[in-house]
Amino acid sequence: MNPDAVLRCLVVDDESHLRSILLRLLTGEGFRCREAAGGREALEALEREPADLVISDIRMPGMDGLELLAQIRARWPETAVVMVTAVSDVASATSCLTQGALDYVAKPFQVEDVQARVRQALDKRRLILENRDYQRNLERKVEAQARHIGELFLHGVQSLAHALEAKDRYTRGHSSRVADYTVAVARALGLDPAVVEELRVGAELHDVGKIGVRESVLNKPAPLTDEEYRHIMEHTVIGERILTPLVGDRPRILQMVRSHHERFGGGGLPDGLRGGAIPLPARIVTVADAFDAMTTGRAYRPARTPEVALEELRREAGAQFDAAVVGAFDRAFRDLTLLPQAPAAASADRRAAAPAAAPPSR
């Protein structure tokens, strides 16, 4: 509440001479005052302009003060309400306090009594508003702190994933490149910038589950056996399990981590999803992941050139990959402002491997 603001007051009483007395008194106290002769007229006045303070008689024809109080508490909860009652009706006035009135004045009243009751009611209102604002600010601070802690954990997980990649010269930088390709494809598809940024994070983390894969398998300098392949494919579920407590409110990231080895035509891992049942974020990172895998050499096979890898993506469109995503990748590939340079595999001295189904990244 701005301490320099002129407070607005509405005086409600069916007796005009009492309204006049209160209006003169409160105007002298610095309020900007209006008046109403009954409950319904008061509500109409409040709808036109809310008030900081309402002083209302309890017993009025039509809508009485108790019903007016209930309406004000429901519709204008920040308004301070002071009830006016006859001395013999103090029980009704105190009942009003339990229903949200901040104070009451008994008739016949003294000027000093009205002034004291009004100040007391406004002090209560100020404390209520300050407490509410404090609670809101506290909740925002707690939420911000929780987000910050979550981001720190997330950054820690990203660092672990990059450290894991750094131990293998063949996969070094893989997640960062996949993130760049994913962003380029998402932009080519016209996705919202906020979604694009979320997909960047998901792509950075898509292989984080490899933390739980045996290094002897992860860094094996030869093709994998069936058992080793099944073991390494467990990284999708492991990654989802690691990230769920951190990004459970961002399902796109979890979709990318769990489903980036699904195949558009079916038969992928871990759930055997197909077509549109595979979330779009996962379909995007699948293409980006495969492209980087093909254009990065391994000890047991040379890298393919970006052009050969792109042709392989086109051949597998509709089978392994979503054709619309491959088309977006193709557009991004031809727009140097969208797609970053492919890894060193693009250099002319790299030999192109014979095209085959795109291998899973390792």
Image (cartoon, rainbow, N blue to C red):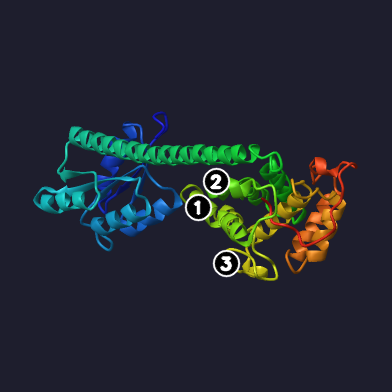
Q: In this view, which residue lies farthest toward the left?
A: 88
Can you see residue 306? yes
Give me the residue at 11% from left, 48% from top: 87
Which amino acid type is marked by label 3?
A: Asp
The N terminus is located in which quarter? top left
Locate residue 122 relative to residue 107 in the image: left or right: right
Helix, strand or loop under label 3: loop
From the image, tell me which residue sits under label 1.
Answer: 249
x, y (%) of residue 120? 23, 35
Circles 2, 1 touching at the beta carbon (< 8 Å): no
x, y (%) of residue 139? 39, 41
Locate residue 307 relative to residue 190 in the image: left or right: right
x, y (%) of residue 345? 82, 43
Rounded to the nearest angstrom, the CA distance separating label 3 from label 1 is 22 Å
Up-down relation of residue 241 to residue 118 (above or below): below
From the image, tell me which residue sits under label 2.
Answer: 211
Can you see residue 24? no
Can you tell which quarter of the image residue 61 is in? bottom left
Locate residue 46 relative to residue 362 in the image: left or right: left
Question: Circle 1: is it few (<14), some (14-19), or many (20+) Cα within 10 Å?
Answer: few
Up-down relation of residue 172 to residue 265 (above or below): above
Numbered label attached to residue 271: 3
Can you tell which quarter of the image residue 281 is in? bottom right
Question: Circle 2: is it few (<14), some (14-19), or many (20+) Cα within 10 Å?
Answer: some
